[in-house]
Image (tube, rainbow, N blue to C red):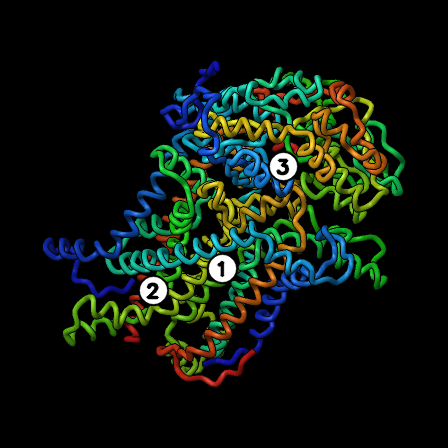
């Protein structure tokens, strides 16, 4: 990470630095502390208490919920969610990266239009989009009807109510979350680096591999993190497009909080998920930092 | 600037993928049938019904208020956070903290904030939805602006300082303009996410002031009629017209890009 | 009027606001109501008519499922809702949690419009804290032109070859378990782990033959022909029948459940007297007969059902089920601690 701040370590400077940081980190930090940390701590604290007979919370400490978690059923759901999340993320990356790259090569006027065009579908309602999807792909849907009408198939091809259908549904939902950070990262790179490499005789592919790709890694990481966790936490797509036959962490948590009215157990799942989140983010930050250090060195050496 | 070339293919494929269901949505808005799933002929009747539906219109109004306000708040807070993290922190912890709200399952955030409000005896309303939406929206803005900051050339800022500009002047005249594309991207994303957000809004809204997703979702029990498709179509139309109009009026060019002659797709 | 002093659930350490005493002489024109009900489940002009008659302003808000409104009501503090429409077993849970106001019958004289059977409902005998609004049962909704009439839950659980892959079951845990429990001869309210295990084993086999679990669009699947046989609530099946007369509803021979949608008054309400007046108003014959005619659900209101046009029974035969017949089925009740076992069962089946 490049910085113009003075050398750290000098006490007076560090103090001034702290003060200078206040208007930037202060407002957001306070806001998050009040409306993110407090609710999160509150809701994960329920994990240590018991469900009342008819729902609600009985304020007696217990670790039963964590014991309940060690169950092949729930661990299986977690493992499956991780798998689904990973697949969705990879697909989003495969599709999103070329798309974001293409957008950066458009003229500025078209670039904004292209970006907004990526987001526009999501200004319609998710339920409406999902129903449209179902109408297209279900056994009596438009695609099957068309294929049967054209004589290409006899029986409808089942394209919904399966796990792959859920993957595609989730991909549809979260693709913009991959494209936007990728675009932001790709659009910021210094075109001179690529030009320099080309002038030195590198082929377009080599330029991509050695210049573009590494520089876009922060965007890649951000995009992956944006897609991975929300994909696992979604409970509507598995229900509607998966026909209730795929259970992700999102469904699990929703079922505990809303259907079983077992806030303590739901909270236990939440706690586990939160901890995984923190681990993931810290890992991403560590990787990101290492990349940026490399970049700083490269810039120092090339003077670019 | 390199040409699009082969990249044209994935670009178009992506748009086809994204817009195929949207095409269906628009077509269905003309379905002369109470049920979405059965086509019974062409009709325009859902459009007048839409505008006469006060519940849906109220939901729309609430949603626009919430999304706009939350976007403004989130963009300001998120950008400040991003700059602060970029300049004044080394470790990933502050960064992880700032981005985490984007990743927490919405159910947890919604119930969590509701619980806090209940505990403090505060009333719910559009304000509570705005506050809740700002929480996760600012995390997205922070992440996107940070991604852009990682590439910025610090020499411009240094030059500005060397020439005697104060910190705040440098920030507003040099840093912010450089960040503008990232900020715009972040704000757009924040607005989009808030507009269609259901779970958090459900738990943090007062029963009498629902947002549009809540209103629509509550219609599920007795069938979502094509009226909602008409709404979606109208929203799309309005957005497209607005964007094209804005493009025509403000011919902004990105100052850090070199001039190029790439043709439009 | 006696106040039930059960434990408070949710995290608010203070008791819900609003006095627990009903003042029969209160001037209700100074009160306002927020009523939460399923969308399109009541007459469009209900709020207006009530305001005309009583001067009380009513805002009708919608919820999509019992679970959602329960989460809002039990989160602690004041949900802002005065009258909540929830299904019977949920009313039971709310009451056990001390969240419901006991109904003052002197303010609800229209209760006499109800069938006598409607006061003997297992989740709330005597309607102490809830008033029934609509009721029905669960059964098989199917296409008469695409299959032989089913007679048993087994026709769904172990479907014939031509029906396999074209069936759906309800996804809510109590109703997911119901067909298996009934087919095995067990109670819908079973709390026996062995019985649940057997039900689970059956459902695991059934899952492989299912098209999908579906609580909301199963009747459209029938209309389009994607599904031929579905587990359905009788009222919902009528929506399918309205679109395609080839659809029919039958209660399997092993029996089924009786579910009831009820009206409740929240203890946190500051407008309890107006709320009771509202409940009373809804129990008027012409209000409830509108429900029956337009929502195609049976109502437990004798005066209302007597007003119905007999033609409705021809098109929607299940509307003719008498209260006596309905009460032969098992009323669904909340199972307290054991509820979580049903959720676990549903998760196991769905994830397996």
Report which quarter residue C228 is drawn in: top right
Report which quarter residue C203 is drawn in: top right
Q: Quadrant of the N terminus of chain B?
A: bottom left
Residue drawn at the location 26% of the way across and 53% of the way down:
A25
Of residues A139 and C327, the one drawn nearer to the viewer in this rendering = C327
* Residue situated furthest left in the rendering: A12
Residue at numbered disc 1: A178
Mark 1 and mark 3: span between their CA atoms?
28 Å
* Residue A89 in picture, x, y percent from top left: 53, 54
* Residue A162 in picture, x, y percent from top left: 68, 46
- The subunit carrying tag 3 is C
Report which quarter residue B188 is drawn in: bottom left
Q: Give the crowd class for mark 3: few <14, some 14-19, many >=20 residues within 10 Å.
A: some
Callout 1: SS: helix
> Does residue A115 show up?
yes
Mark 3 and mark 2: span between their CA atoms?
42 Å
- Asked if the residue at tag 2 contacts the one at tag 3, i.e. Cβ–Cβ closer than 8 Å, the answer is no
Residue drawn at the location 48% of the way across and 14% of the way down:
C2
Q: Give the crowd class for mark 2: few <14, some 14-19, many >=20 residues within 10 Å.
A: many
Callout 2: SS: loop
- The subunit carrying tag 1 is A
**Dot label at residue C22:** none
Residue drawn at the location 80% of the way across and 35% of the way down:
C309
The vertical placement of C81 against A167, above or below, is above
The vertical placement of C32 against A114, above or below, is above
**Dot label at residue B150:** 2
- The subunit carrying tag 2 is B
Q: Give the crowd class for mark 1: few <14, some 14-19, many >=20 residues within 10 Å.
A: many
- Asked if the residue at tag 2 contacts the one at tag 1, i.e. Cβ–Cβ closer than 8 Å, the answer is no
Closer mark to the observer between disc 1 and disc 2: 1
Of residues C286 and B160, the one drawn nearer to the viewer in this rendering = C286
Residue at numbered disc 3: C351
């Amino acid at each position: 990470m490049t910085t113009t701040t003075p050398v750290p370590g000098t006490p007076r400077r560090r103090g001034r630095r702290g003060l200078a940081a206040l208007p930037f980190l202060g407002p957001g930090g306070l806001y998050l502390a009040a409306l993110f940390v407090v609710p999160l701590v509150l809701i994960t604290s329920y994990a240590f208490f018991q469900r009342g007979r008819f729902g609600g919370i009985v304020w007696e400490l217990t670790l039963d919920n964590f014991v309940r978690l060690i169950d092949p059923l729930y661990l299986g759901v977690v493992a499956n969610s991780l798998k689904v999340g990973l697949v969705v993320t990879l697909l989003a990356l495969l599709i999103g990266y070329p798309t974001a790259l293409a957008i950066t090569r458009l003229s500025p006027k078209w670039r904004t239009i292209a970006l907004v065009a990526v987001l526009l579908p999501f200004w319609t309602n998710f339920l409406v989009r999902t129903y449209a999807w179902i109408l297209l792909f279900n056994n009596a849907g438009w695609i099957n009807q068309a294929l049967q009408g054209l004589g290409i198939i006899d029986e409808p091809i089942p394209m919904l109510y399966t796990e792959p259908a859920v993957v595609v549904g989730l991909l549809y939902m979260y693709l913009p979350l991959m494209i936007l950070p990728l675009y932001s990262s790709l659009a910021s790179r210094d075109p001179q680096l690529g030009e320099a490499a080309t002038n030195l005789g590198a082929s377009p592919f080599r330029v991509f591999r050695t210049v573009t790709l590494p520089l876009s890694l922060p965007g890649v990481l951000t995009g992956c993190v944006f897609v991975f966790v929300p994909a696992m936490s979604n409970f509507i797509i598995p229900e509607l497009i998966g026909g209730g036959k795929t259970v992700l962490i999102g469904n699990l948590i929703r079922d505990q909080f809303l259907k079983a009215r077992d806030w303590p157990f739901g909270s236990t799942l939440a706690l586990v998920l939160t901890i995984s989140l923190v681990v993931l983010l810290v890992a991403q930050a560590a990787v990101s930092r290492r990349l940026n250090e490399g970049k700083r060195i490269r810039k120092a050496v090339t003077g670019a | 600037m390199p040409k699009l070339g082969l990249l044209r293919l994935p670009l178009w494929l992506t748009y086809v993928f994204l817009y195929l269901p949207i095409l269906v949505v628009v077509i269905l808005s003309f379905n002369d049938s109470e049920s979405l799933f059965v086509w019974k002929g062409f009709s325009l009747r859902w459009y007048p019904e839409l505008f006469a539906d006060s519940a849906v219109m109220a939901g729309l109004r609430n949603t626009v208020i919430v999304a706009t306000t939350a976007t403004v708040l989130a963009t300001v807070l998120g950008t400040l956070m991003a700059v602060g993290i970029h300049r004044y922190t080394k470790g990933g912890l502050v960064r992880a903290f700032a981005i985490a709200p984007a990743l927490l399952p919405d159910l947890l955030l919604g119930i969590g904030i509701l619980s806090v409000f209940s505990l403090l005896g505060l009333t719910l309303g559009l304000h509570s939805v705005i506050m809740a939406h700002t929480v996760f929206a600012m995390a997205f803005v922070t992440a996107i602006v940070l991604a852009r900051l990682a590439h910025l050339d610090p020499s411009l800022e240094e030059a500005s300082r060397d020439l005697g500009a104060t910190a705040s002047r440098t920030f507003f005249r040099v840093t912010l303009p450089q960040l503008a594309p990232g900020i715009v991207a972040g704000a757009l994303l924040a607005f989009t996410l808030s507009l269609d957000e259901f779970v958090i809004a459900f738990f943090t809204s007062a029963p009498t002031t629902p947002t549009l997703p809540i209103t629509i979702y509550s219609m599920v029990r007795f069938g979502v009629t094509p009226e909602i498709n008409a709404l979606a179509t109208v929203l799309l139309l309005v957005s497209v017209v607005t964007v094209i109009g804005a493009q025509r009026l403000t011919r902004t060019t990105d100052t850090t890009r070199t001039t190029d002659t790439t043709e439009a797709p | 009027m006696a106040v039930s002093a059960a434990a408070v659930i949710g995290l608010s350490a203070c008791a819900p606001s609003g006095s627990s005493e009903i003042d029969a002489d209160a001037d209700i024109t100074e009160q306002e109501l927020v009523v939460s009900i399923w969308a399109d489940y009541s007459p469009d002009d209900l709020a207006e008519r009530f305001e005309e008659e009583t001067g009380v302003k009513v805002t009708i808000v919608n919820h999509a499922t019992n679970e959602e409104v329960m989460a809002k009501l039990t989160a602690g503090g004041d949900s802002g809702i005065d009258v909540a429409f929830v299904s019977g077993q949920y009313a039971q849970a709310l009451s056990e949690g001390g969240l419901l106001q006991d109904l003052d019958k002197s303010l609800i004289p229209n209760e006499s419009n109800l069938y006598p059977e409607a006061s003997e409902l297992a989740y709330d005998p005597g309607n102490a804290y809830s008033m029934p609004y609509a009721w029905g049962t669960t059964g098989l909704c199917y296409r008469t032109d695409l299959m032989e009439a089913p007679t048993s839950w087994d026709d769904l659980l172990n479907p014939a070859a031509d029906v396999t892959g074209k069936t759906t079951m309800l996804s809510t845990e109590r109703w997911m378990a119901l067909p298996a429990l009934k087919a095995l001869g067990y109670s819908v309210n079973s709390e026996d782990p062995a019985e649940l295990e057997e039900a689970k084993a059956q459902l695991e086999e059934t899952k492989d033959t299912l098209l999908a679990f579906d609580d909301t669009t199963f009747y459209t699947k029938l209309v389009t022909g994607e599904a031929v046989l579905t587990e359905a609530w009788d009222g919902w099946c009528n929506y399918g029948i309205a679109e395609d007369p080839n659809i029919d509803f039958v209660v399997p021979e092993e029996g089924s459940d009786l579910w009831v949608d009820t009206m409740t008054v929240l203890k946190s309400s500051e407008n309890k007297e107006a709320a009771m007046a509202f409940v009373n108003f809804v129990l008027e014959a012409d209000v409830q007969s509108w429900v029956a005619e337009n929502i195609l659900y049976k109502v437990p209101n004798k005066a209302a059902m007597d007003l119905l046009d007999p033609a409705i029974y021809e098109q929607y035969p299940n509307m003719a089920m008498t209260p006596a017949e309905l009460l032969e089925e098992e009323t669904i009740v909340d199972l307290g601690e054991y509820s979580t076992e049903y959720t676990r069962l549903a998760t196991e089946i769905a994830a397996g």
